[in-house]
């Protein structure tokens, strides 16, 4: 981001907040899939839950200016279709003019702050359907952590179902990210076994009065062939914060991208904060995976 762009962003935020709505109204939109079968979406909604760490760096995402720099690089690369973000990040990108001809998905429930005693209470604290429609976004994403031993899960399920229904009525995509989760040692963790993921998918895909506009967002795990047989819904693979070597991670993504029903990737930290910090190279590598999968 150039210095003049940064200064203009700060000035618009302070003096001309109306320019956010103006930029949203002027944004050039595009079809979700266009003429290609798969999408590559950059995720930038982690900080809203207080999740700032990446690969052992606990404050990697602390600087908003640095994060915006990385997002602008990623969104400028060939093969990147769009972004998933909370209103604060999305509005910065709108003011910077970075979202023309991109798929734009608003992140909705960020209330389950990482590490909090109420983390399972994934309340809708960011976008709601009314705002997504008003800002001319292309859909909304919701985290749906299912904790069998935590009664706050019932509220999450009900809220997610309501959002799916409302988005579908407006002809907008509802991106559901389901997990079979539990609290272990004070932290909320996900069961990433195939059986648990299949259970989570079946609950998540049944939310709402219609699944016509529902897409799933799930992690790449072992036995993905069996996992993908659990749904007929379009599915995007979750990149997450990989712990293995990049080559191994990319290989697992490339294999999963070839499965029926998989429609691309939603990747955030792995591409915005890669080893060596070469965002462009990391994005280009993953874009190559999509091409190789018959994008």
Image (cartoon, rainbow, N blue to C red):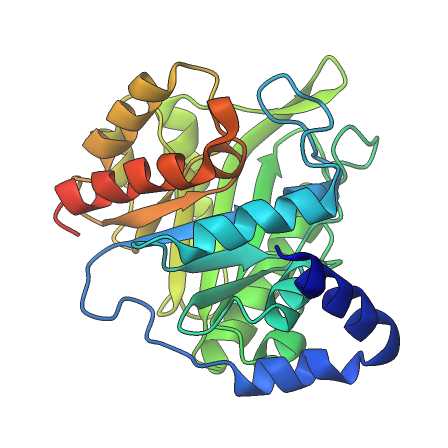
Q: Across the whole image, how many numbered discs are drawn on residues? A: 0
Q: Nearer the viewer, residue 111 or 67?
A: 67
What residue is rendered at 67% in x and 27% in y?
Answer: 53
The picture places residue 174, in percent across and down from the top left corner, at 47, 63
Can residue 45 be seen from the camera position used here?
A: no
Residue 68 spot, x, y in % from top left = 63, 51
Q: Residue at x 30, y 48 (%)?
A: 264
Q: Residue at x 55, y 45 (%)?
A: 70
Of the 4 image quadrants, the one containing the N terminus is bottom right
Q: Is residue 10 above or below residue 236?
A: below
Q: Residue at x 38, y 35 (%)?
A: 282
Q: Quadrant of residue 34?
A: bottom left
Q: Please state the horizontal and vertical placement of residue 255, each as a whole percent of the image.
A: 20, 30
Can residue 161 be seen from the camera position used here? Answer: yes
Task: Report the front residue among 17 and 192.
Answer: 17
Horizontally, residue 130 falls left or right of residue 207, namely right
Q: Nearer the viewer, residue 86 or 111?
A: 86
Residue 286: x and y in percent read 31, 38
Classify 18 as above or below 237. below
């Amino acid at each position: 981001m150039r210095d003049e762009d940064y200064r203009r962003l700060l000035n618009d935020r302070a003096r001309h907040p109306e320019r956010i709505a103006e930029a949203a109204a002027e944004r050039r939109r595009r079809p979700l899939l266009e003429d290609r079968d798969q999408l590559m979406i950059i995720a930038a909604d982690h900080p809203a839950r207080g999740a700032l760490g990446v690969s052992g760096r606990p404050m990697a995402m602390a600087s908003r200016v640095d994060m915006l720099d990385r997002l602008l690089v990623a969104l400028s690369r060939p093969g990147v279709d769009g972004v998933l973000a909370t209103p604060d990040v999305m509005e910065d990108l709108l003011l910077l003019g970075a979202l023309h001809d991109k798929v734009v998905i608003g992140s909705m429930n960020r209330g389950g702050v990482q590490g909090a005693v109420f983390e399972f209470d994934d309340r809708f604290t960011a976008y709601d359907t009314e705002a997504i429609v008003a800002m001319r976004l292309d859909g909304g994403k919701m985290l749906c952590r299912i904790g069998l031993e935590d009664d706050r899960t019932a509220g999450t399920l009900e809220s997610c179902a309501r959002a799916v229904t409302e988005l579908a009525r407006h002809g907008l995509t509802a991106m559901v990210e389901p997990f079979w989760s539990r609290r272990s040692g004070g932290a909320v963790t996900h069961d990433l076994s195939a059986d648990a993921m299949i259970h989570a998918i079946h609950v998540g895909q049944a939310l709402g009065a219609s699944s016509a506009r529902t897409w799933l967002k799930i992690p790449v795990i072992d036995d993905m062939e069996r996992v993908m047989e659990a749904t007929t819904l379009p599915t995007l693979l979750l990149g997450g914060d990989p712990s293995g070597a990049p080559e191994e991670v990319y290989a697992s993504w490339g294999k999963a991208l070839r499965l029926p029903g998989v429609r691309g990737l939603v990747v955030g930290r792995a591409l915005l904060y890669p080893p060596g910090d070469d965002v462009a190279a990391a994005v280009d590598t993953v874009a190559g995976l999509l091409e190789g999968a018959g994008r």
